[in-house]
Image (cartoon, rainbow, N blue to C red):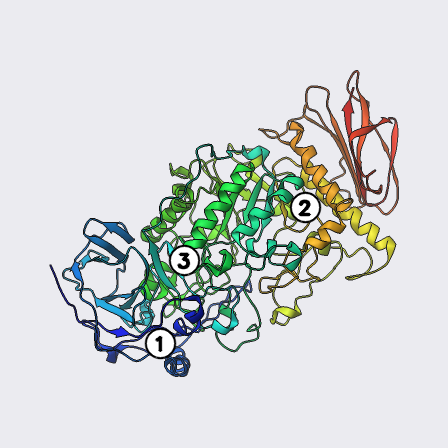
Amino acid sequence: MTASPVVAILPAPQLSSNNFNRFFIAPYRASSIIGLNSSKRPPAEFFGQNSFSKTREHHKISPAKVYARRAEEQRVIEEEAPQMLETFPSFEITPGLAHPLGVSEIESGINFAIFSQHASAVTLCVILPKSDGMIELALDPQKNRTVNIWHICIKELPRGDVLYGYRIDGPQSWHEGHRFDNSIVLIDPYAKLIEGRRAFGDVSNKICRFFGTYDFNTLPFDWGESYKLPNIPEKDLVIYEMNVRAFTADESSGLDPDQRGSYLGVIEKIPHLLELGVNAVELMPVFEFDELEFQRRPNPRDHMINTWGYSTINFFAPMSRYASCAGGPVSASREFKQMVKALHDAGIEVILDVVYNHTNEADDKNPYTTSFRGIDNKVYYMVDLNNNGQLLNFSGCGNTFNCNHPVVMELILESLRHWVTEYHVDGFRFDLASVLCRGTDGTPINAPPLVKAIAKDSVLSRCKIIAEPWDCGGLYLVGKFPNWDRWAEWNGKYRDDIRRFIKVNKRKPYHSVNFVIAHDGFTLYDLVSYNSKHNDANGEGGNDGCNDNFSWNCGIEGETSDAYIFALRSRQMKNFHLALMISQGTPMMLMGDEYGHTRRGNNNSYGHDTAINNFQWGQLEAKKNDHFRFFSKMIKFRQSHSVFKKENFLDKNEITWLEDNWYNEESRFLAFTLHDGNGGDIYLAFNAHHFFVKAAIPSPPQNRRWHRVVDTNLKSPGDFVTEGIAGISGTYNVAPYSAILLEAKQ
């Protein structure tokens, strides 16, 4: 049918990069829309504040107080809002299809479909390329709703450069878990691309609105005839945790300013990754997020820029401000694929750090409504119906995604499949994955449907799936995360104890992702330089970040010119790296530890777009012949020795413990031999005493001699000699706070 629906059109400037600031300054409002009653609208809000402090808080908030606060905020916004126009274009519109969700191109036009079980009214908002405003199309629940899915198809709508969102109205019963607010234009949860501000950290455009967009014009990405996935066995992985922006954002990267902090910037630095020896990168969040969310209202952290990205706006769209030259979402999508292809061509896998436990929409005290909260809060989030419908907070960030609700579970599965099929990623690390093990009421469940579905999904079958097996509600599942023999785990017990993983079910050693350092906590340098965290710059009064760091400053807190302390810290960092690389399991290291990056004792540096987080390429060059050399050679030594990469857990014939006084609190010495079955045994000793230990060296296998490969007490290049130094026998004086590695060779 042909129709000219009653619509509201709001003027909007042309969508050039020069006027994005003005255009995205406010949500667009309209009062003359079919099917909506403007008198029922609560005051609009979108000044949210996400809490990154990993503490569990339940706010009992009065809706009236929230609305009163938002009324003043809305007054400021409306001063910038455009006036309505009287003219509008005509479209040929049909009811459309309920599936697939999101935007799709079908024979009859561009189809839009969105789920909302509890909505009473849905309005599609569209901004055309080079248009004068926003078009709002009210959906008829009798024609445009199939069960709980609202849908519409528009013929002759452009195949790209269209922005869209939804206004959704529904019950105002807060106590029942609803948070409908039809004054806000909401992002489609299934949008594949998101448009917002173009430049990362552009504070002149901090109060930016985000819209869904689509691109049916661009040809499919050319992966190349010779392209293939690396398909590296898990036991052979060495993972490098990194942040896309921080990797090249610093001027010392030597890249063009338009390329710094981008997906293309990563490509330029692949030679560094190869020189280091890692074969997988674990990218900190690359789903669309608002890096300026802390600056939307006055608060103690309004100087911060969220550089870590653990505050997802949308689960399908790549972070658009990681595109080069402020190129926007279409460029971001293409350049992300270019990055993945280049990494794969170099033999490096791509694992994404994904955040399905919560979203950016924060809590009920200071909500930042952009999507799920306004679409159907009761479905998408866990709510406590016995406590005035308040949000449950097992994430420490104000809300908890309702992962095991059938609708939410399918959204997550579709998101994961999208990143595998569209972007060719190789795996996922799930942030606070214990949230995925909670039912819709927050109760822990033994066989969570989502965790099982991910393990059994055919599209995801080739992927590495890694759990961070805890959450902020106390559900600690290290060693017992429901796994179906597929899930690996971040081994927090290894981090704290540097001990071998506990055997569970039919799992393998490589199901333990071992790490000493990760993004949240001290860097390796800070671990040996600070006894206490120094987080004052975060604006939380030092209350954020972990207090139990198991660190030692080697005698002086922070920076020092003392040569002895400097040398001791250097040894300690090498000791940690050696222990990590010889452990059974999958090792993971943090970006920057290869040169000794410092955050000046800040162990929760999520909000600093500065040298605190950014890779310092000049410092790397200064450490190339010492610290970096040791780290690189140790990684490559691991890769070339199967004794460190066993398919199964070690048995008594594969390891001989020589010093293992586990329960002697006075013991600070550990020694053992790994047997490879072919005579190429490895002897290791770690001395954490403050004095020399004269270690008895066992006899080497027949027709072999011990060769010293590593002694962390020696200066470079003597600290690591790949071919080994022969003549080691009888005893060896292991220096204080040092470690040695001997290899049996002919």
Left or right: residue 622 compared with residue 81: right
SS of the residue under disc 1: loop
Say whether residue 448 is visible: no
Name the side, left or right, on which 147 lies relative to 458. Answer: left
Disc 1, disc 2: CB below 8 Å? no
Name the secondary structure under disc 3: loop
Residue furthest out toward the left: 1
Of the pair 305 and 475, the residue shown nearer to us? 305
Q: Quadrant of residue 276?
A: top right
Disc 1 to disc 2, C-alpha distance: 50 Å
Mark 1 sits on what residue? 44
Could you tell me how far apart the alpha carbons at marks 1 and 3 are, in whole angstroms? 21 Å
Left or right: 708 with respect to 496? right
Whichever of callouts 1 and 2 sits on the residue coming sooner in the sequence is 1
Question: Which amino acid is tagged 1?
Answer: Ala
Who's the residue at 21% across and 73% down the image? 36
Ranked by sequence position, the earlier of labels 2 and 3 is 3
Where is the N terminus found, in terms of image quarters?
bottom left
Task: Decide which of 30, 438 is in the foreground and name it.
Answer: 30
Which picture quadrant has residue 561? bottom right
Q: x%, y% of residue 172?
A: 29, 73
Disc 2: which residue: 497
The amino acid type found where label 2 is placed reads: Asp
The crowd level at tag 3 (other Cα within 10 Å; few <14, some 14-19, many 20+) is many
Provide the residue designation for mark 3.
Answer: 314
